[in-house]
Image (spheres, rainbow, N blue to C red):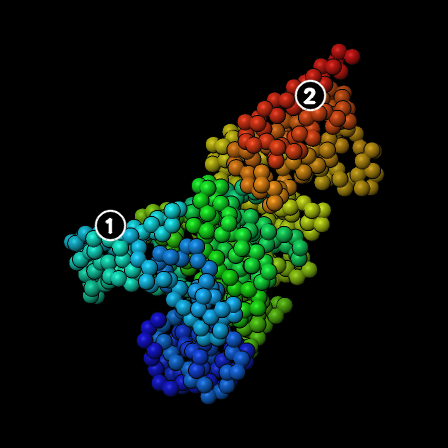
Amino acid sequence: MAAEAGGKAFVTRVSGPVVSASGMAGASMYEVVRVGELGLVGEVVRQAGDAAVVQVYEDTSMLKPGAPVLRTGAPLSLWLGPGLIGNIYDGVQRPLPALLAKGGTWIKRGERADPLDLARRWDWEPLLAPGQAVSGGQAAGLVRETPLVTHKVLVPPGVSGTVRSAAGPGSYAAREVLAVVDTPSGPAEIRMLQEWPVRRPRPAAERVRVSEPLVTGQRVIDAFFPLAKGGCACIPGGFGTGKTITQHQLAKWSDADIIIFVGCGERGNEMTEVLREFPGLRDPRTGRPLMERTILIANTSNMPVAAREVSIYTGITMAEYYRDMGLDVAVFADSTSRWAEALREMSSRLEEMPAEEGFPASLPSRLAQFYERGGAVRTLGGERGSVSIVGAVSPPGGDFSEPVTQHTRRFTRVFWSLDTELANARHYPSINWLRSYSDYLDEVGPAWEKVRPGWSGLRAEAMEVLQREEHYRQIARLVGPDALPDAQRLYLFMGGVLRDGYLSQSAFDAADMYCAPDKQAALLDLAMTLYRGARDYIKEGGGLAEVAALPCVPEVVRAKSACAGPAEVAALAARVRAEVEALAAGREGA
């Protein structure tokens, strides 16, 4: 933070986390202040002459009018540098492990700790030399942050000139000067530690077209409603539909280089599960601990509401920082509804005019500002990086017409609609394949074609089966399934095979919690092989009951767990073809 500045300001009114102060002439919007004797962290959100309104990110109990307010002259900013990965922060980047060691289980008001360990020394590999011309975004050196992540220390945006001096290889702390650059405005010092305002997007050279899928290992997502690296997705669902478990699965197994999980207004027990489970997980690609590429931001529902509002900006700013190194970053926010509720409460205390359902009129623009910070870019250093965002939405009563869900749909291109009926039937992920969609199919299609030539046609064929199954299911509810001919009942049969053998995926099945792309393609090919064989057999006059009685059918449903890889699935597909052909040959012989 900048040095504390300004005259004597004091509290005049306290309304929960919203504090009015006088003596604030000259303060800037979003300037950080310290409120009260404990120095509670706050941020100016309204300024009018000598008076200002401050939202405080800590509990304001026992705060009284007349308490001092100290200005810092700087906006709320994050410390960015090596040591972020593997750490657990609250919404304003206070490191929770450090606070636990310092003061016990409960966070005391006004308690602070450095977001990064300033005493830790890092092995530095310089990339700059005296006399070299540099510009913002260029890598000044490399630090091995974890075995999975090589951290590039970047020249800050806006800094360009000639290197006057540069430190050689060695071990350095985060605040030590590693290089000095002569710029038109004077010398600029390069350190590992940099600060960046959370509400200001980090610059990039240009936005680029997304083209690579974010592989999550979840079949219903990757195969049917894929998300591209640099894309944004919405995952809405009512209580008990599995939003949090689905978010956890995506955070665990997504093939992004960096994972940032923001528990924004989450229940304490669910966030505790994340904090206990993630450190023990292994990355499926490398076998290394997953925390070696993960940052957790825990801002539970019992924490101050103002900190909830800023927590998603904390997560997205960290994501942009690693994006600028040329990495693919995935941000999972659970849930943006709790964030919107924080906006509503803050807006009410600020006495702003409410819009629909009491949310502030600025809700659409605030959502847009968050999601537009995702995307694939060419960085200032000339590399390609991306930030993918998955925001969970918790509509009250599962009503998707409420404002947060509707506005989020406007700014995202993927909609994973969670279904209460599927959840009640213990079908997880409970993503409804008829109400969900992805606008990235054309962009990621070529990547899937490399995994399995003809992938687009295979997916379209499976979707047609599922759509027809729903159509005939509605008819069967009226007249009964026995009234349908076998050609139509086939869709009911295959819909069940696809639901149980492909679309459902247990987060607690060690063999099936993650499914690699080649196995996903092989499993879908297996199901469609059974469908085509049955369809042709029925066309020739055979019966569906004979196909359903084949020994291979139960194995098709169990293949997702029983088959270790695509080779075993392909062998089972060959068995399916052989059994159907033998059935047809036996009928012709009879």
Q: Which residue is mark 2?
A: 580
Secondary structure found at label 1: loop
Q: Crowding at label 2, few (<14), some or many (≥20) Cα neighbours within 10 Å? A: many
Identify which residue is drawn at 17% across, 58% down. Answer: 164
468 relative position to 58: left or right = right
Identify which residue is drawn at 62% across, 67% down. Answer: 356
Return the mark for residue 127: 1
Q: Crowding at label 1, few (<14), some or many (≥20) Cα neighbours within 10 Å? A: some
On screen, residue 282 above or below 584: below
Regarding residue 256, the answer to whether it shows in the image is: no
For the N terminus, give its image quadrant.
bottom left
For the C terminus, give its image quadrant.
top right
On screen, residue 406 above or below 362: above
Given residues 299 and 45, the one toward you in this image is 299
Return the mark for residue 214: none
Res 498 quadrant in image: top right
